[in-house]
């Protein structure tokens, strides 16, 4: 088995060297990946790690913003049960790092996740030596898992999600996949499909649980009337005008949505659209696109200059605000779904009691899509023409829109508790008192942990 990991290291190094010119270009020209570069290679600053020396530590890892949001609810529950444990939180992306510093208040420190070379991971683990490692969603890294296990850490996949593409990709890992899955102590998956996928890949049935999605339990995105009042004032909006929030868009989507905005604006002249590109560095690109179409826009970072009589498209170029901005929306569209990207988090708007619209490509969020459709709080459209028709209908029928909002709140309430169930599993592996048995969320509740 050791030979397999040597081969994995070599292949990873080859891929890294091939990507290095692109990486250097992005670092030098675009300024990406500069922050935390030493941490990515396992060099952790003394002032960051000294507090973990000799202390029981739980290392929680989430790749980016969405995963950080989902993990935050688990961290809150775990810290409540184990206040004496130190929490180290890691991310891969800069945006994830920014979000973690903003909302994961229980974390004692945040770092960038080390690259999965054995010598890099080994260096980082030797400095932290976690008692428990909690990986989230699809963050399964062979060397990190292997070396953490060799260091006698308990390892758990929390809020586990296996997309169709991930399911196909993991199969190429061959024997290393089998060993990696064997080294994970528990898999807490979001849905029955995720449970079936991870078992099909080779996870032992006795280690796998279906505990639901922790994004139903996130605290920072909960409705906050004072925050909403502040947003109305800062954005220079009034509660009588229709507000369309378009979140997490990608290239080609903003262009497709131009006629939607123009048609809605024709019929509802007071309408304002708040548009949030998935990657905020594209904000100026999106701004240019809309200005070329003759539409007055303003960036969120320049909102104090907004003229309410003219600037009817606000482009969000900040991190961490979108979830709260959904709270002031009348209509919500979630991007990544008009193109073959696979969609984004459609639960965040539902938390605020919003009917959510999305396109045909939601293959990365199948369970969430089924859920909102089953509750009648999501509308999936084939194209922008259908989206325009549906949105116009609900703008003209406010009572039905409010009814959908109440149904959305009910859906959230009916499905909360995943973070607590994940925390119970963390307690289980820390205490090491109970033999792992095949289970589900109900089985865990029956145990009374």
Image: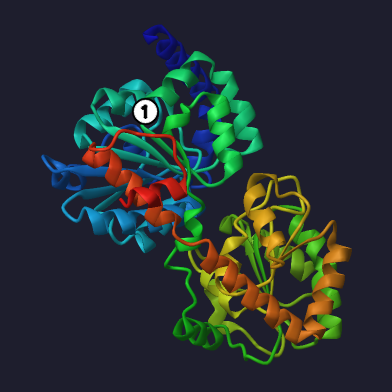
Colouring style? rainbow
Outermost residue toward the left in this view = 54
Query: What's the residue at 21%, 34% (across, down)?
Result: 129
Outermost residue toward the top in this view = 3
Query: What's the residue at 48%, 27% (across, down)?
Result: 203
Going by the image, does 381 lie left or right of 18?
A: right
Q: Is residue 82 visible?
A: yes
Q: Quadrant of residue 122?
A: top left
Residue 156, placed above or below residue 183: below
Residue 282, placed above or below residue 223: above
Going by the image, does 215 lie left or right of 38?
A: right
Residue 328, placed above or below residue 118: below
Q: How many marks?
A: 1
Q: Tag 1: Cα neighbours inside 10 Å, few (<14), some, or many (≥20)?
A: many
- Looking at the picture, tell me which residue is in the foreground, 306 or 136: 136
- Looking at the picture, tell me which residue is in the foreground, 352 or 116: 352
Estimate the x, y position of residue 67 in percent, counting from the top left: 48, 50
Figure quadrant of the N terminus:
top left
Outermost residue toward the front in this view = 446
- Looking at the picture, tell me which residue is in the foreground, 42 or 334: 334
Q: Quadrant of residue 124?
A: top left
Q: Which residue is mark 1?
A: 145
Going by the image, does 392 lie left or right of 321?
A: right
């Amino acid at each position: 088995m050791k030979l397999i990991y040597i081969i994995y290291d070599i292949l990873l190094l080859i891929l890294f060297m091939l990507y290095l010119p692109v990486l250097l270009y992005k670092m030098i020209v675009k300024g990406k990946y500069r922050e935390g570069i030493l941490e990515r290679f396992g060099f952790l600053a003394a002032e960051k790690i000294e507090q973990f020396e000799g202390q029981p530590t739980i290392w929680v890892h989430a790749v980016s913003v969405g995963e950080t949001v989902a993990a935050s609810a688990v961290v809150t529950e775990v810290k409540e049960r184990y206040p004496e444990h130190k929490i180290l939180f890691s991310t891969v992306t800069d945006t994830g790092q920014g979000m973690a510093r903003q909302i994961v208040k229980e974390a004692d420190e945040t770092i960038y996740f080390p690259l999965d070379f054995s010598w890099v991971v080994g260096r980082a683990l030797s400095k932290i030596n976690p008692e428990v490692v909690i990986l989230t969603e699809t963050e399964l890294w062979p060397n990190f898992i292997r070396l953490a296990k060799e260091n006698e850490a308990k390892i758990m996949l929390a809020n586990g999600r296996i997309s169709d593409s991930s399911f196909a990709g993991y199969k190429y890992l061959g024997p290393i996949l089998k060993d990696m899955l064997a080294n994970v102590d528990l898999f807490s998956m979001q849905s029955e499909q995720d449970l079936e996928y991870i078992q099909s890949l080779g996870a032992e049935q006795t280690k796998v649980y279906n505990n639901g999605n922790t994004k139903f339990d996130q605290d920072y995105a909960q409705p906050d009337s004072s925050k909403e009042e502040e947003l109305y004032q800062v954005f220079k909006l009034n509660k009588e005008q229709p507000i369309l929030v378009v979140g997490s868009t990608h290239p080609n989507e903003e262009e497709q949505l131009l006629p939607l905005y123009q048609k809605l604006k024709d019929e509802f002249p007071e309408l304002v659209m708040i548009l949030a590109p998935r990657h905020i560095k594209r904000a100026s690109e999106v701004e240019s696109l809309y200005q070329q179409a003759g539409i007055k826009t303003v960036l969120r970072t320049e909102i104090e200059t907004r003229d309410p009589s003219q600037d009817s498209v606000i482009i969000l170029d900040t991190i961490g605000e979108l979830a709260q901005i959904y709270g002031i929306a009348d209509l919500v569209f979630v991007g990544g779904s008009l193109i073959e990207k696979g969609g984004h988090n459609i639960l965040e708007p539902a938390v605020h009691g919003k009917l959510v619209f999305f396109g045909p490509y939601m293959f990365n969020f199948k369970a969430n899509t089924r859920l909102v459709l089953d509750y009648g709080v999501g509308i999936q459209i084939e194209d922008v023409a259908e989206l325009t028709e549906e949105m116009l209908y609900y703008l003209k029928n406010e009572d039905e829109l409010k009814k959908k909002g109440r149904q959305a709140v009910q859906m959230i309430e009916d499905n909360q508790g995943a973070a607590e169930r994940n925390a119970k599993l963390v307690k289980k592996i820390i205490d090491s008192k109970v033999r792992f048995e095949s289970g589900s969320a109900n089985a865990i509740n029956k145990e009374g942990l």
